[in-house]
Amino acid sequence: MYSQETLVLLQHFLDLGLSKTAMARQFGVSRRTIHHWIRTGQLDRVADAPSVRHPRPRPQKLDGYQPLIAERLTTFPALSAERLFQECRAAGYGGGITQLRDYVARVRPREEPEPIVRFETAPGVQAQFDFAEVRFPWGKRWMLLVVLGYSRYLYVEFVPRQTALTVMLGLERAFAYFGGVPQEILFDQMKAVIVEDHRPGGGRLLENPEFLRFAAHWGFRIRACRPYRAQTKGKVERPVGYVRISFLYGRIFLNDPDVADQGARWLTEVANVRCHGTTKESPALRFARDERVLLQPLAARPYRSLILSAGPTLAAEPPRPGAIPRVPVERRALAHYDTLLAERR
C-alpha cells in the first residue's frame, strides 16, 4: 500500500513524460504495477482528489494578552482565572472570561505530584493504627485497624466511639491477638494521641499525657504522621478499602456480636492467609516465620488509668474476695436542695 504522496509524485512524473521503466526503477516497483495503476485509473483519482486545507486560526481578542498571562503564571502559578481576567481587563482586554478561563486551563504550569516513597520496616519494629467510619442498619460504628508493618498481619474490630479509651482498649486487644508488642506505633493526628504537632515550624510533637503513660506501660514509642501527610500511613490506609470490599460488602450482619464473630473468622480464614499484593506472601506466614518472635512481650497486667472512667483498670478485673462494693453517691450543691424546698412550699 503506497501513500497518497507517492502516487501523486508518480502522476507528476507521468505528466513530465518519464518512461514507465525509469519510474519503476525510481520507486522500486515493477513496470506491471505502473501499468496497473494507469489502467485502473488510480493515479487519476489521486490527482483529482481535493487537497486538504487547514484553515488558519482566527485571531482572538485574547491573543495580545497571552504574554501577560504567561508572565503572571510563571511568577504566581496559582493565580485564579478570575484574578487574571481582572488584570487583563485593566490592561484593555475586551473579551469574555470563558475564553480566558479555557486558555489558562491549557497553559497553567502544573506541579509534578510529590512521589510517595514506600518504606519498609524490619520485623517487630512498627505497627500502624487507624479508624474508619462504617454504617450498619443499627447505627454508626468505627472500624479500628492495627497492622504490623513488616508482615501486614492485620487486626480489625468495630467500636461505637472514637475516644482515647477506645484506642487503648483496642490496642490492648490487638497486642493480645499478636501475642506481643511492636517497638513503635504510627498514628495520624488524632487528638486521643496527639495534642499538637509543632514539627513543621521546627518544634516538637506534643503527645496526650495519658496516652504517653499507656505507651510507657506497654513499652512502645508513639510516632505520628506529619500534618497533611497521612499517605505515609499507607500500610493501614490500604487495608481500610480491603476490609470494605472483602469483608463488609455483600454480607448480612445481625448485630454487633455477629459482626465481631464474622470478623474474627474472616481475619483467620481470609485476610491473614491471602497472598499480599506487595509482599507476595501470606501475612500469617511472614508473621509466624519472621515477626512473632521479635515482638516485645506483653505487659504483666492491663494499663491502670488514672483519669479515664472505665473502672479501676482499662480491662475489667474481677472483684476481690471479701471486698466491700463501692456504691456511687450523687453529689449536689446545697443550693439545689433549697430550690427543691422552695418548689414544695
Image (spheres, rainbow, N blue to C red):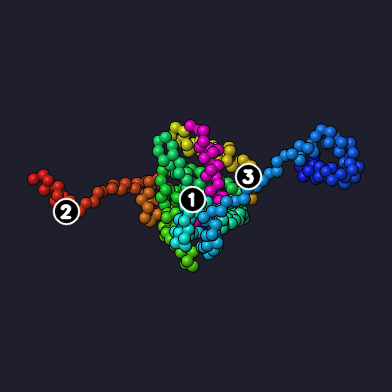
Name the disc covering residue 98, or none: 1
The residue positioned 38% from the left and 56% from the top of the image is: 306
How many C-alpha atoms fall within 10 Å of the one at disc 3: few (<14), some, or many (≥20)? few
28 lies left or right of 266? right
Q: Label 2 near label 1: C-beta < 8 Å?
A: no
Q: For the residue labelled by badge 2, is the local secondary structure a helix, a strand or a loop? A: helix
Quadrant location of the N terminus in the rendered image: top right
Task: Nearest to the eye among marks 1 and 2: give it.
Answer: 1
Amino acid at the residue labelled 2: Ala
Whether the magenta-drawn stretch holds residue 251 is answered as: yes
Viewer-nearest residue: 177 or 160: 160
Viewer-nearest residue: 332 or 81: 81
CA gap, disc 3 and disc 1: 46 Å
How many C-alpha atoms fall within 10 Å of the one at disc 1: few (<14), some, or many (≥20)? few
Amino acid at the residue labelled 3: Gly
Considering only order in the chain, which callout, 2 or 1, is on the residue closer to the N terminus? 1
Q: Is residue 248 visible?
A: yes
329 lies left or right of 64? left
Q: Is residue 298 visible?
A: no
Whether the magenta-drawn stretch holds residue 214 is answered as: no
Q: Which residue carries the number 2 mark? A: 335
Residue 145 vertical position relative to residue 116 in the rendered view, above or below: above
The residue positioned 83% from the left and 36% from the top of the image is: 37
CA gap, disc 1 and disc 2: 69 Å
Q: Which residue carries the number 3 mark? A: 277
Residue segment shown in magenta: 224-252
Residue 301 vertical position relative to residue 251 in the rendered view, above or below: below
307 lies left or right of 281? left
Amino acid at the residue labelled 1: Thr
Residue 248 vertical position relative to residue 56 in the rendered view, above or below: above
Viewer-nearest residue: 48 or 213: 48
86 lies left or right of 231? left
